[in-house]
């Protein structure tokens, strides 16, 4: 697993844990909100490990746990 994938996985899992949700609860809520595209805890876990989680899925996870994903310009000086 690439270092970037590990960092992204750890960041997302950390935010989930801090929010008091479990990955299983997140997946159940994702399936409730979008029953036409069901997923499993294993599927999301695999995507996190491989670094293949879609941006739309990351936004759904963030929304469920009460977070926003922000694009903040970096100082390039």
Image (tube, helix red, strand yellow):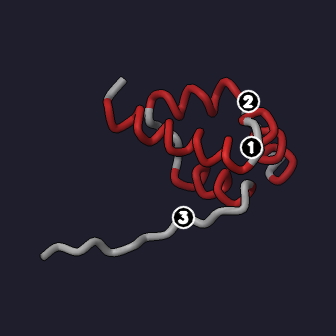
Query: Which numbered mark, 3 or 1, is in the foreground of this view?
Result: 3
Residue drawn at the location 66% of the way across and 51% of the way down: 61
Q: Is residue 63 above or below residue 42?
A: below
User: Horizontal and vertical percent for residue 76?
Assistant: 17, 73
Query: Which numbered mark, 1 or 2, is in the foreground of this view?
Result: 2
User: Horizontal and vertical percent for residue 26?
Assistant: 76, 43
Q: Depth check: give the residue in front, 24 or 20.
A: 20
User: Horizontal and vertical percent for residue 19?
Assistant: 72, 50
Q: Which mark is residue 37?
A: 1
**SS state under label 2:** loop
**SS state under label 1:** loop
Classify 10 Å Cα crowding around label 1: few (below 14), some (14-19), many (20 and above): few
Pointer 3 residue: 69
Q: Which mark is residue 40?
A: 2
User: For this view, does 77 lie left or right of residue 34?
Assistant: left
Lower position in the chain sequence, tag 2 or tag 3: 2
Classify 10 Å Cα crowding around label 3: few (below 14), some (14-19), many (20 and above): few
Residue drawn at the location 44% of the way across and 42% of the way down: 8
Q: Give the Cα separation between the discs numbered 3 and 1.
A: 22 Å
């Amino acid at each position: 697993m690439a270092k970037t994938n590990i960092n992204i996985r750890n960041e997302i899992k950390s935010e989930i844990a801090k929010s008091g949700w479990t990955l299983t609860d997140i997946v159940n809520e994702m399936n409730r909100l979008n029953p036409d595209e069901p997923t499993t805890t294993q599927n999301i876990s695999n995507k996190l490990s491989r670094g293949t989680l879609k941006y739309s899925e990351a936004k759904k996870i963030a929304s469920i746990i009460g977070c926003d994903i922000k694009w903040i310009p970096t100082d390039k000086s």
